């Protein structure tokens, strides 16, 4: 069985986007190099440094499914039926979207029974591969429910000042020392184990 982790590009002050969901300069590292890393979306190709390209390729080669919340699903319009990493997407939501349909949308699974059920569905879809839980509310719920094995941070040298935090809620969590620390242009990739 694979690892369950959360992952996000994060500012130095802990935000993953502005209040309007715009990531601003947090995604600049996806264009900081000259190594082309194509995605499943024809219109989206990353241009990464060698360090970031190795990190992203290793991450995506092990990724079997993604868990997101309804907010991210709506902001991205469900990636028009195909996530850039071309994996099944489990959407944790209170209400299934009505009338949403794109080619490939059969790869999207809507779960209304909470984060534990959503991660269970993602694990079954991923098989022996990893499951990524998108940041914000979903990552917070997964952490508080004891479902995360790792927290991954793409730390960007930007201070947003306000916005949407990587984690919400008031609980204090002490993670283990980083098992991965990769310095790259405009980003430091960090992986922290979660101790239960």
Image (spheres, rainbow, N blue to C red):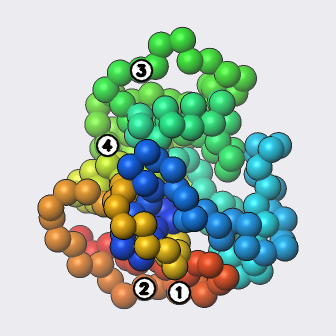
Furthest toward the front, the residue is 161
If you read the primary sequence from the N terminus, does the residue marked by circle 1 or circle 3 appear first? 3
Asked if labels 2 and 3 touch by Cβ distance under 8 angstroms, the answer is no
Asked if labels 2 and 1 touch by Cβ distance under 8 angstroms, the answer is yes
Q: Is residue 46 above or below residue 106?
A: below
If you read the primary sequence from the N terminus, does the residue marked by circle 4 or circle 1 appear first? 4
Asked if labels 1 and 4 touch by Cβ distance under 8 angstroms, the answer is no
Mark 1 burial class by Cα count in 10 Å: few <14, some 14-19, many 20+: few
Q: Which residue is the site of mark 3?
A: 96
If you read the primary sequence from the N terminus, does the residue marked by circle 3 or circle 2 appear first? 3
- Specify whether residue 90 is in view: no
Mark 4 or mark 1: which is in front?
A: 1
Q: Which residue is the site of mark 4?
A: 115
Mark 3 burial class by Cα count in 10 Å: few <14, some 14-19, many 20+: some
Q: Secondary structure at mark 4?
A: helix
- The percent position of residue 156, horizontal first and vertical second, equals 52, 75
Q: Which residue is the site of mark 1?
A: 181
Horizontally, is 159 left or right of 117 in the view?
right
Residue at coordinates 84% horizontally, 72% vertically from top-left?
35
Horizontally, is 164 left or right of 88 in the view?
left
Q: Secondary structure at mark 3?
A: loop
Residue at coordinates 82% horizontally, 43% vertically from top-left?
42
Asked if labels 3 and 4 touch by Cβ distance under 8 angstroms, the answer is no
């Amino acid at each position: 069985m694979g690892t369950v982790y959360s992952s996000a590009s994060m500012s130095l002050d802990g935000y993953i986007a502005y209040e309007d969901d715009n990531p601003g300069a947090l995604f600049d590292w996806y264009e900081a190099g000259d190594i082309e890393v194509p995605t499943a979306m024809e219109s989206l190709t990353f241009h990464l440094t060698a360090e970031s390209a190795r990190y992203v390729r290793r991450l995506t080669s092990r990724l079997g499914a993604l868990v997101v919340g309804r907010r991210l699903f709506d902001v991205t319009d469900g990636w028009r039926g195909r996530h850039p990493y071309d994996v099944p997407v489990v959407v944790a939501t209170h209400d299934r979207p009505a009338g949403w349909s794109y080619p490939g949308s059969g790869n999207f699974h809507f779960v209304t029974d909470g984060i534990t059920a959503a991660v269970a569905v993602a694990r079954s879809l991923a098989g022996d591969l990893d499951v990524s839980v998108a940041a914000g509310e979903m990552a917070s719920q997964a952490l508080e429910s004891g479902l995360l094995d790792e927290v991954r941070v793409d730390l960007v040298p930007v201070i947003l000042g306000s916005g949407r935090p990587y984690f919400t809620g008031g609980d204090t969590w002490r993670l283990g020392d980083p098992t991965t620390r990769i310095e790259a242009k405009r980003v430091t990739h960090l992986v922290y184990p979660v101790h239960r």
